[in-house]
Amino acid sequence: MASATTVHAAAPIIAAPARRTRNPDQTRRAILDAATAEFSEKGFSGGRVDDIAARTATTKRMIYYYFGGKEQLYAAVLDELYGGMRDAERALHLERDAPRIAMRRLVEVTFDHHAAHPEFVRLVCVENIHEGRHVATSPSLAQRNDAVLGTLRALLARGEAAGVFRAGVDAFDLHMLISGFCFYRISNRHTLRAIFGAEVGAREAAHREMIVEAVLRYLAP
């Protein structure tokens, strides 16, 4: 009787798992996005690095590696949010437009940015609770925010020379007029709803045109 020949199947070749590479820019971006959400919801005092790490695919150790600590991360979030507003203004290239058109575009982009970024408004409120402590220690924030006053001064000077803006308007006062309304309608939208039953979102187009008209009338000779 012929003996059966035993055939052993070759063991399957299992590929070694690919090493996961960490993109530093993507990791930093993910941390900043998670920190923005955490701090805007809970403030600086209530925000926790552990919770920020839990919102991302990274670790608490990596957050400290990239930013140094909670306070530095919070400052980085503020720097980015303020920078976003300034970048939107700079992208307008207002020097190309006639003064009244340029002013209209500047007011509109300020309104739109506040409406689209309530987290920016909330974090500015948080920073004011802390008496501007983190903003005051950031040289880059001071430089960026001074740029908008320079933009306004140049625009006011052009408008005055063209006879379409009155003389003597202070750039900082004008900045407060523009930003004040745009900020207030977002920062106080919940109390406005609770007290007046008003939904500011439903009046967005009317409010946008109202602040443009208010500024242009204020500047008229």
Image: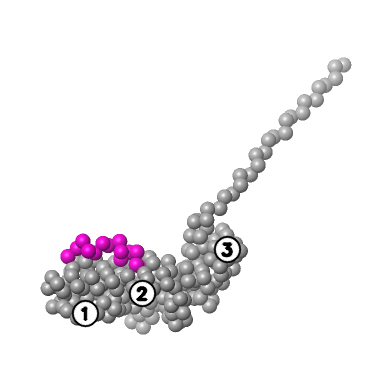
Measure how far apart labels 3 and 2 are at the Cα level.
34 Å
Mark found first going from the N terminus, 3 or 2: 3
Please name the predominant secondary structure of the magenta segment in the image: helix
Which labelled disc corresponds to residue 169?
1
76 vs 9, nearest the viewer = 76
Mark found first going from the N terminus, 3 or 1: 3
Residue that label 2 marks: 186
Q: Is residue 57 left or right of residue 131?
A: right
Residue 71 is inside the magenta segment: no
Residue at 73% x, 30% y is 10
Residue that lies at the very extreme toward the top in this rendered image: 1
Instruction: Report the magenta residues as a range.
Output: 85-98
Q: Indicate the amino acid at tag 3.
A: Tyr
Q: Is residue 215 visible?
A: yes
Q: Is residue 206 visible?
A: no
Measure how far apart labels 3 and 1 are at the Cα level.
47 Å
Residue that label 3 marks: 65
